[in-house]
Image (cartoon, rainbow, N blue to C red):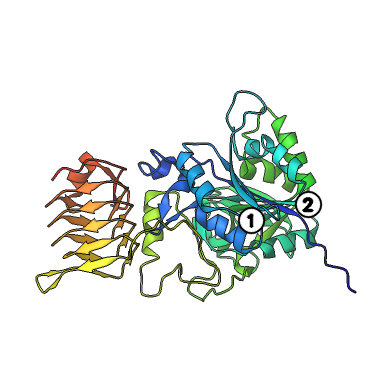
Amino acid sequence: MAKPRYEPKVLSIVLAGGEGKRLMPLTADRAKPAVPFGGIYRLVDFVLSNLVNGGYLRVVVLTQYKSHSLDRHVTTTWRMSTLLGNYVTPVPAQQRLGPRWFAGSADAIYQSLNLIDDDRPDYVIVYGADHVYRMDPRQMVRQHIEAEVGVTVAAIRQPIEMADQFGVIVVETGTRRIEGFLEKPKNPTGLADAPDQVYASMGNYVFTTDALIDAVSTDAADPDSKHDLGGDIIPMMVRRGDAEVYDFKDNDVPGAEDRDRGYWRDVGTLDAFYDGHMDLVSMHPVFNLYNLDWPIYTYHAPLPPAKFVHSEPHRMGHALDSMCAPGVVVSGATVHRSILSPRVTVNSWAQVTGSVLFDNVHVGRNAIVRNAIIDKNVIVPEGAQIGVDLERDRERFTVSDGGVVVIGKGAKVDP
């Protein structure tokens, strides 16, 4: 009888303590990974779905900034069978090393070494919680094990003219070995097989456990360090010759199609967040939520299906090129190229165009909402206009560089 194949023990750590200042006012009352996305999801659901779909069922979510809604979402949504020792659990800054918060992502790992010691994994996955993408982590772990290095860094190819927006990875010619890590370089060298592209770090890492413990412990003793994984730990391991790149283009997710294969979006700014939503509502969505071979999991509230009334020619409730969550009621209104979250109501003769409405937003009769993001529990009164006069909107709300009007949670909107 053949011996069962040894499966390496892997612990996943999701870094979810981000403050998300560039997403204000959406992060005024919640951590960035808890920000709603795509009508029914939270940003953290994308990374957790990738890990769980990949079979990694022991996951620690490190939280810090305004974490209540994130903690509640993780604990109520992400329940695993405890029979086999599986779990997804939020862990706040425990202040085990004194009365201080995490000083950076590397310090978050260092302050949480007890979690690694308790689980005793062979390898540790460390992924961020701020991006929208699908990725099979097993393929990255497999490459890491075969390479026998301390860390493998996931990279996505980006146009060379966008290099100053990313941490850029430089590899040794003809290998995957990382020889440099440049923070937002102005004049980088392109890839050997694609001179017009560079490797941009995705903020996803696989570590050999002993290498990770050694690196964060060494970093913790350095008073000049910013204690950041990308800024301090990875360059340290590059200098040691102990880092390799994983090319995201080689990741093959079940059910992926040509239009969304290799999709990855950093939604860390208001305009990027808005554009990420617009990727969802085209005829052939750039990011396909309908890939049931690699589902995105989340909590589903006990709400009725979306409803569209009335049907008179002068008062017809309909939504075109849009996504409507359960509990939505479009009553005699027109919705176009928009995403409506649960319990949104749009009343007669109102027009909602190119907008993202969070949970429990109510749009009154004859109101106009254009190119807007409206956080939960906002009432847009009858006849109000949003996105029509941007100068007036700037006096009342946040308007992004791209002209998207953003209204914070529970804000009062005057007619």
- On the image, which quarter does residue 21 sit in? top left
As helix, strand or loop, the secondary structure at mark 1 comes to loop
Vertical position of residue 202 compared to residue 296: above or below: above
Vertical position of residue 106 compared to residue 291: above or below: above
Identity of the amino acid at label 1? Ser
Vertical position of residue 67 compared to residue 310: above or below: above
Q: Position of residue 210 (x, y in %)?
A: 79, 45
Apparent side of residue 31 relative to residue 190 in the rendered image (left or right): left
Which tag is nearer the camera, tag 2 or tag 1?
Answer: 1
Q: Position of residue 388 (x, y in %)?
A: 17, 54
- On the image, which quarter does residue 277 sit in? bottom left
Q: CA distance from mark 2 to mark 1?
A: 22 Å
Q: Position of residue 55 (x, y in %)?
A: 66, 62
Q: Quadrant of the N terminus?
A: bottom right
Residue 173 visible somewhere in the drawing:
no
What residue sits 62% from the left and 32% below the top?
Answer: 94
| Other residues around mark 1 within 10 Å, as few (<14) / some (14–19) / many (≥20) | few
* Residue under numbered circle 2: 122
* Residue under numbered circle 1: 81
What residue sits 59% from the left and 65% below the top?
Answer: 195
What residue sits 46% from the left and 56% below the top?
Answer: 299
